[in-house]
Amino acid sequence: MTNHAQDPPVIQVENLHLSYNVGTANELHVIKGMSFTVQRGEVICILGPSGTGKSSLIRCLNGLTVPQQGRISINGQILFPQQTNIRLLRKDIGFVFQHFELFPHMSVLRNVSLALQKVKRYKSEIANKRAMEALKQVGLADKAQASPAELSGGQKQRVAIARALAQDPKIILFDEPTSALDPELIGEVLAVMENIARQGMTMLVVTHEVDFARRVAQRVFFLDQGVILEEGVPEHVFTRPDQERTREFLRASHLIDLGTQTGVQIPRPTIPPSAAAGAPPIIQVKDLCLVYNRDDGSELPVLKGVNFAVQRGEVVCILGPSGTGKSSLIRCLNGLTPPTYGSVVINGIDIYSPGYDITLARQDIGFVFQHFELIPHISVLGNVSLALRKVQRMKRALAEEKAKAALAKVGLADKANASPAELSGGQKQRVAIARALAQDPQIILFDEPTSALDPELIGEVLKVMEDIAAQGMTMLVVTHEIDFAKRVAHRVFFLDQGTIWEQGPPDTMFTAPRKERTWQFLSASQLLRGATPPASFEAPDMPAKAINQKFAGFKPLIKDKERFDRASILASTSMWLGVLLAVPFFLWPASGPLAAATGIRVLITKPRHPNATFKAWFGLASGVAQMVLFAIMLLAICTVFPWFCII
C-alpha cells in the first residue's frame, strides 16, 4: 500500500454525536463524541459489542444516518453539518450491506449496473461494460446472467462488493460483510477484500470476526459505550491491549491467545446415559429427500437420502457449506418444511405417516430461529407466553407463570416487561430459547443461534445452551461457529452435497477428519489453519456421482406441486359442497311455504288439467318436506350451537 501519511486525511470526523428517538423517553445516545481521521488507502476494522454504534458510525459517513452534532468531511468536502451535494459525495463512497440487498428478480449483471444507470446516468452499454469489469475483479464474470437465488452467500456478498466497485469509489464502507457466512465463504469474501486493499482502496470494515480484522487491517478501532475506547495496529490491540474492557471482549472471542490471562478450561461434554445404555433413539431419520420447486418449473434437490439417529440427551452440531441443506434438514424434523420422500420418526412415531397430526409432534419440539422472530410490539413475557396460550390453549395466568420460569432459566427474569427493542442481540436470542423451553419440549432445534452476534453475545448464548444441555435436553444445532460446536457437541455432522459427508465426536472431527472434503472445509477456519494434511484420506462413503444416482432412484410419494394441486382441488370441492348445502337451507323458509301454498291453490281450482293435479300434489308434498327438514335442521343447530338460536 502506498504511504499517504503526509497527505490530508480522506475522512475526518470531529466530536460526532448520534441519538435515536430524540426528545422521547426512549432516547438512546449511540455515538458520544467520536473523533478520528482516516488516511487514503488505509484499511480500518471496527470491532466492539453489539449495539455500541459501529454500523451507525459508518452509516453517518455516507449520509444514510444523520447525526445531531459534530463534523464529517470526506475528501475535504463537508458532509455534515451542511450536507451540501450529498448525492455527489456518495458517488465516491461505496457501501456493502450486511445482508447483500440484491434485487431477487434481476440478474447479477443488472444488480451491479442499475446504480450506474440510475445514479450516474450511464448509458446501458457503458454501465454493463463497467459492471462486467467489476464482476471480473471479484471473480464472478461467469455469473453475470445468473439470478441471485442461484448464488451462495459468499457469491452474493461478492456481487455486493462488485456493485460498490463499479462506481469507481475512493472509499468503501463494509457493514459486517462476513456475518452469517460459513468459514469457506468468509475466506472467499476476505480474499476479494484483501485484493481490493492491495490496490490502495480506503476501507472501513465493521466486523465481528476478530481473526478477519487481524489479517486485513492497518488499524483497529474498538468501540464500546459509544466511544472509541482503544485504537492501534492489530498486533498491539490483539496481543497487548491497553484497556481491560478490550481484553474482556477478546477473551470472549476464543480467537485471541489470551489463555494465560483467563485460566478458563473448556468443558468436555459427556456421553448421554441413554446412548450408552443402547436405548431406542429419540430421532430416527431414514432416506430423507427434499426437492424445492423453482419458479421456472425446474427442481432443486437439497437433501439426497439423509440417514441418522439421535439419542435422548445428545447435542449434535450440524456444520457445512452454505446452501447444503442444514437449515432445511432441521425444518423437516418438525414439519416446517415437509420432505419430498423419506421418514422422520420422533419418539417412535413417523410424523409424516398418513393421517398423523404433525402438530402433536411439534408440542415436543422447540425451535429457535436464526433471527429471533420476536413480535416487536408485545413484551418479552408476551412473546414467551403467546404460543402457550394460542397453541396449547393455556389460561393466561398459567402461561405467564411458565413463561416467567423459562425466562428465569435463561437469566432474563428481570426483562419480562421489557420490549424486544430494548434488548441486545444476545438477550433476544435468549428470549427465543426461553420461548422454546416454556413448551416443556423433549427436543430443541437451533437454526444458527449465534449468527451475526459478537463474540461476547455468542458466549452469552452458549452459556445458556450449555446449561440446557447439562439438564439432558436433546439438541440439534445448525451453526457456522466451529469453536462453538467444538465446545458443546457430543457429535458433529458435516453436511455437503445434500448428505452427511462425515460424522463423529468433536475431538476427531476437528483435529483429524477422515475425509478430504471435511479437511478442506475446516482448513478455512482457524482450527486447522497451518496444520499439515495427512498423506491420504479415506474415500467418501458414497462419491458425489453415487449420491446423485441413489437420489434419482427415490420416487417421491407425492411431488410438492402435485400435493399442492390436489389440496387446492379438494379445498374447492369442499367449499362448493358447503355452498350447495347452505343455499337450500336458507331458501327453504321461503320456498317450502310457497310450494305448498301454490299446490293447494291448484288443487282447489276447477276445472284443471290432469297433469296439473300430479304437479300440484308434488309441489305440496315438497313444500311440506322442506318445512319439516328446515325445522329438524334448525333444532339440531340450536342443540349444538345454542348461541345461534339466541341470535
Image (cartoon, rainbow, N blue to C red):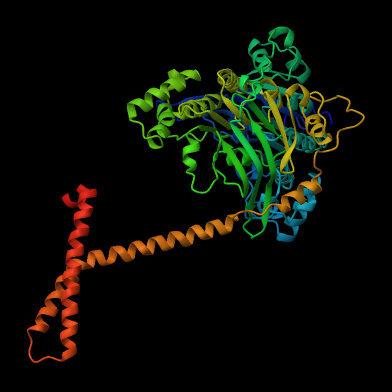
Residue at position x 75%, y 52% from top?
Answer: 131
Q: Which of 647 and 78 is in front in this view?
A: 647
Task: Specify whether residue 64 is in view.
Answer: no
Q: Which of 300 and 359 is in front in this view?
A: 359
Q: Residue furthest right?
A: 535
Q: Which of 103 and 28 is in front in this view?
A: 103
For residue 235, above or below residue 61: above
Tell me: 8 left or right of 375: right
Residue at position x 81%, y 48% from top?
Answer: 545
Tell me: 597 left or right of 560: left
* Percent coordinates x, y for residue 210 in the rendering: 71, 24
Q: In which quarter of the image is the N terminus?
A: top right
* Percent coordinates x, y for residue 452 in the rendering: 62, 31
Tell me: 401 left or right of 640: right
* Percent coordinates x, y for residue 350 in the rendering: 56, 41
For residue 290, above or below residue 466: below
Q: Nearer the viewer, residue 350 or 406?
A: 350
- Numbered disc total: 0
* Percent coordinates x, y for residue 312 in the rendering: 59, 26
Task: Specify whether residue 592 is in view.
Answer: yes
For residue 113, above or below residue 360: below
Residue 343 lies in what quarter of the image? Answer: top right
Tell me: 561 left or right of 641: right
